[in-house]
Image (spheres, helix red, strand yellow):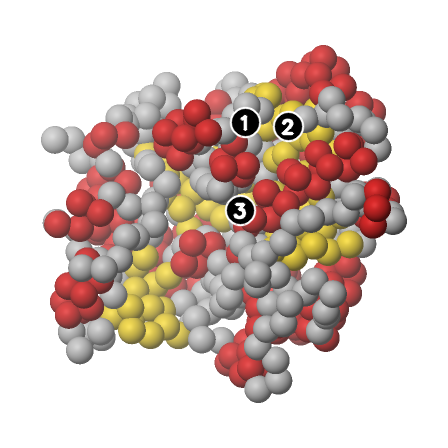
Amino acid sequence: MKNNNIITRDLATLWHPCSQMKDHEWLPLVPIKRGEGVWLEDFEGKRYLDAISSWWVNMFGHCNPRINDRIKAQLDTLEHVILAGFSHEPVVELSERLIKITPAGLTRCFYTDNGSSAIEATLKMSFHYWLNLGQPRKTKFITLSNSYHGETLGALAVGDVKLFKDTYAPLLMTPITVTSPDCYFRETGESEADYSTRLFAEMEQTLAQHHDEVCAVIVEPLVQCVGSMRMYDPVYLKLLRKACDHYGVHLITDEIAVGFGRTGTLFACEQADITPDFMCLSKGITGGYLPLAVVMTHDHIYQAFYDNYEKMNAFLHSHSYTGNPLGCAAALATLDIFEQDNVIENNRALSQHMGNAVAHLKDHPQVGDVRQRGMIIAMEMVKDKQTKEAYPWQERRGLRVYQHALKRGALLRPVGNVIYFMPPYVITPEQIDFLAEVATEGIDIATRAE
């Protein structure tokens, strides 16, 4: 079978996510036949290095034999069962293990299908908690500018990326938006910690003014991934945890994209030494195999819903595939690899190599910033290096990098004008060097004067 056969059949039947389908009149789809390690292979044998972990989900390579084996064994035992009134061993074991490795105090696990669904459940849970405690005025959420939490309506509402949100604004609740502490626009000579601390003043003021009507503050800890991979200092999380406690507001950390080692620690919250009231996990939890998400929270929040049936205080939120045994099996195999292979420590060397491989781009005349947090590194193309003036989005400079990378055998899918690497942890230093070479070529092509 040839690529064109799949492409023709695809375009006759599919509607792809996050795509203007008309683009595919001139931008060919890339049909993939198989994957192994960091590589994806099309139907004609061409390989592509998956530099973005297939939308940030793949931790330990495609077709990882250890994850494969765990799923195959589970498939012969139990594929799925309702989780309302029933249970199974994989979901219990996974819950026990997550409680051990997440920040102290997160002792209850509520499962959903995917990241957006986890956010939806968390928003409802926070509101419902306050309602059960007799505080019905708490109905609002505070979010950061440039944030992203998913694309179902509740998750979309508490995000702030206009590309995704503006069209659906009439359908959405209105959050209170506070300026993000991302350090891209900090003053010359100002440290990331000082800048993030300075930006916290607005959050403090907002909490002081609105805490009586606010359920929770929701943040992506340390990296706003969809928001151009913008990054901030852990001190902001420390200050936010303290302020939320002081004003009686929940803290929700969306670790869907940044959890499981992406920022250099198993969870981003560890770098601030905080425990949120709710932590949302998905994507890498199954190593990129199956959809699974979990909301982790405290027992005192769980207890606010624990009552006689007649009180109608229960959290009536459900998904058909909640706690799916196959997804849990994949997650358990993923946790085994983290435990057995010294992943976080090994990633430190890979992270350093990744930083060194693209360090030369800091001097590129059209690169406004090279920033890194653990196993995430981003290079932002700009029209003017001094002012950081962005290229007009209509020019689609990032798309040129994407096209060049495909020619060279790499999957780079920029966020606007930001080129980034978020690779599987099985990548080698030599493969990182290859990506750096491809990205440099692509940036040169994309920023060439016309």
**Mark 2–mark 1 distance (CA, rounded to whole Å):** 9 Å
Q: Which residue is mark 1?
A: 173
Q: Which mark is residue 116?
A: 3
Mark number, residue 384: none
Quarter where residue 79 is shown: bottom right
Image quarter where the C terminus lies is top left
Q: Amino acid at mark 2?
A: Phe
In this rendering, position of residue 3 left or right of residue 392: left
Badge 2 crowding class, 10 Å Cα cut-off, few under 14, some 14 to 19, many 20 or more, is many
Q: Which residue is mark 2?
A: 141
**Label 1 environment density (alpha carbons within 10 Å; few <14, some 14–19, many ≥20):** some
Give amino acid for label 1: Met
Q: Residue at x 43, y 26 (%)?
A: 169
- Image side of residue 211 versus residue 434, left or right: right
Q: Nearer the viewer, residue 361 or 154?
A: 154
Position of residue 48 measured from the top left corner of the image (x, y, whole percent): 30, 64
Discs 2, 1 touching: Cβ within 8 Å: yes
